[in-house]
Image (cartoon, rainbow, N blue to C red):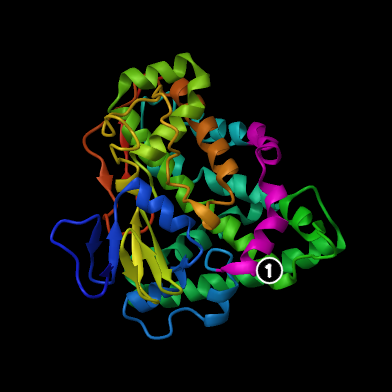
């Protein structure tokens, strides 16, 4: 058996990195992500960035994105009924109305900058509608999401005051919203989370705040960037853009192929909570391992010809990993799929002959959630 700390051969399935190790294979990624002895390393991000203390400890511990064990399982179990495909499908008409509202002012011009004019404003109204937040507060939510997600931008020394200020404002807003919904329930996600009960168990107010914030944050920047990645990809594959416009049933497989080929979440971190042996390598407690989701999604043992983009690709039985795997698989995956499916189906019809105008400006590869910063395009006017 090899000790991961002691050394590895020059060619190996495990890669040494400055903070620990990384792996790139599909089989290894799914195995370690499913292993409950490897915990989310989200709370370690400030430490890995060289900051003492990081964000407040109690905040890091209460987030479902970082929580582990029985408490994590309990929260997911209580929240899951609100995130089923059937529950999120009720939002599809509203999703389409949001898209039409964004596209109506653009289609006659025959050109647009899709990041600022479509991708960035798209998810916030949907998340706010889901939570029951009023239209007047959409811009507040959008700003908070942008500021909080600076935690993944690899510059915490500069960004921590902005992140903490946004989190404080968001905490106060959501706590007040929960108080109102306890007194006057509505037909929204927050009211359903307040009402959910299993064998006498309910979510506490801090748990409701944490869950609501996780929905907002996880459902905003990821969707913005993933839609941008999808549109950039389709702009370079006009035949598949036409095929999607002609056959809207391709929207569902198109989303899975886009997320496999050009996923906005490129990696996830885990830390060994105890000694773990995998494929004759021993990971001591505290070992940090990065799972390269982007590389695993291109593993030829999981997908034949993995560099080829094909929305009609026959499934290989290997789900794409951009939503994660194991106990931390994205709780809102059904909502994200609905948003992306509706967007691609409608955009392919309303923006025919999509092509990049000039060049795409991409975010640096060091950011945690990746996508285009600018996506200038042309299309046939009047869609």
Residue at 43% x, 23% y is: 108
Q: Where is 41 relative to 90, above or below?
A: below
User: Considering depth in this image, is 184 or 294 the residue closer to the camera?
Assistant: 294
User: Considering depth in this image, is 37 or 264 the residue closer to the camera?
Assistant: 37
Majority secondary structure of magenta residues: helix
State which quadrant residue 167 falls in: bottom right
| Residue 180 left/right relative to 347 | right
Q: Position of residue 5 (x, y in %)?
A: 26, 74
Residue matched to label 1: 207
State which quadrant residue 361 falls in: top left
Residue 74 in the magenta stretch? The answer is yes
User: Considering depth in this image, is 72 or 157 the residue closer to the camera?
Assistant: 72
Query: How many badges with numbers are in the image?
Result: 1
Residue at 40% x, 68% y is: 276
Residue at 19% x, 71% y is: 7
Whether residue 174 is visible: no
Q: Where is 333 relative to 279, above or below?
A: above
Residue at 52% x, 32% y is: 341
Q: Position of residue 321 (x, y in %)?
A: 43, 45
Q: Position of residue 74 (x, y in %)?
A: 69, 63
Residue 183 in the magenta stretch? The answer is no
Q: Seen from this angle, which residue lies furthest top? A: 246
Q: Quarter holding the N terminus?
A: bottom left
Whether residue 25 is visible: yes
Where disc 1 sits, the SS reads: helix
Bounds of the magenta span?
Answer: 67-94
Q: Residues within 10 Å of mark 1 (few under 14, many from 20)?
A: some
| Residue 9 left/right relative to 292 | left
State which quadrant residue 279 falls in: bottom left
């Amino acid at each position: 058996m090899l000790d991961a700390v002691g050394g590895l051969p020059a060619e190996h399935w495990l890669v040494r990195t400055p903070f620990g190790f990384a792996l790139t294979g599909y089989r290894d990624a799914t195995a370690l992500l499913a292993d409950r002895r490897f915990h989310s390393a989200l709370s370690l991000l400030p430490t890995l960035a060289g900051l003492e203390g990081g964000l407040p400890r109690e905040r890091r511990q209460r987030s479902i994105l970082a929580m582990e064990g029985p408490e994590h399982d309990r929260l997911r179990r209580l929240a899951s009924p609100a995130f089923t495909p059937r529950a999120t499908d009720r939002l599809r008409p509203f999703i389409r109305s949001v898209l039409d509202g964004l596209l109506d002012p653009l289609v006659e011009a025959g050109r647009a900058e899709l990041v600022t004019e479509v991708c960035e404003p798209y998810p916030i109204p949907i998340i706010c509608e889901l939570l029951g937040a009023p239209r007047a507060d959409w811009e507040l939510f959008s700003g908070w999401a942008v500021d909080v997600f600076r935690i993944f931008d690899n510059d915490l020394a500069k960004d921590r005051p902005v992140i903490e200020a946004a989190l404080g404002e968001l905490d106060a807003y959501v706590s007040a919203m929960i108080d109102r919904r306890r007194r006057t329930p509505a037909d929204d996600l927050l009211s359903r989370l307040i009402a959910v009960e299993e064998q006498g168990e309910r979510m506490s107010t801090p748990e409701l705040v944490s869950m609501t914030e996780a929905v907002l944050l996880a459902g905003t920047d990821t969707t913005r960037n993933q839609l941008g990645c999808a549109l950039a990809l389709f702009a370079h594959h006009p035949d598949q853009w036409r095929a999607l416009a002609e056959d809207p049933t391709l929207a569902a497989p198109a989303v899975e192929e886009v997320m496999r080929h050009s996923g906005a979440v490129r990696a996830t971190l885990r830390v060994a909570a105890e000694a773990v042996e995998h494929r004759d390598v021993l990971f001591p407690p505290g070992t940090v391992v990065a799972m390269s989701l982007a590389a695993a999604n291109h593993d030829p043992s999981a997908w034949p010809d993995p560099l080829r983009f094909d929305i009609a690709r026959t499934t290989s039985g290997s789900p794409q990993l951009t939503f994660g795997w194991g106990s931390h698989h994205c709780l809102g995956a059904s909502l994200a799929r609905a948003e992306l499916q509706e967007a691609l189906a409608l955009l392919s019809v309303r923006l025919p002959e999509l092509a990049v105008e000039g060049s795409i400006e991409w975010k640096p590869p060091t950011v945690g959630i990746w996508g285009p910063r600018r996506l200038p395009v042309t299309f046939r006017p009047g869609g």
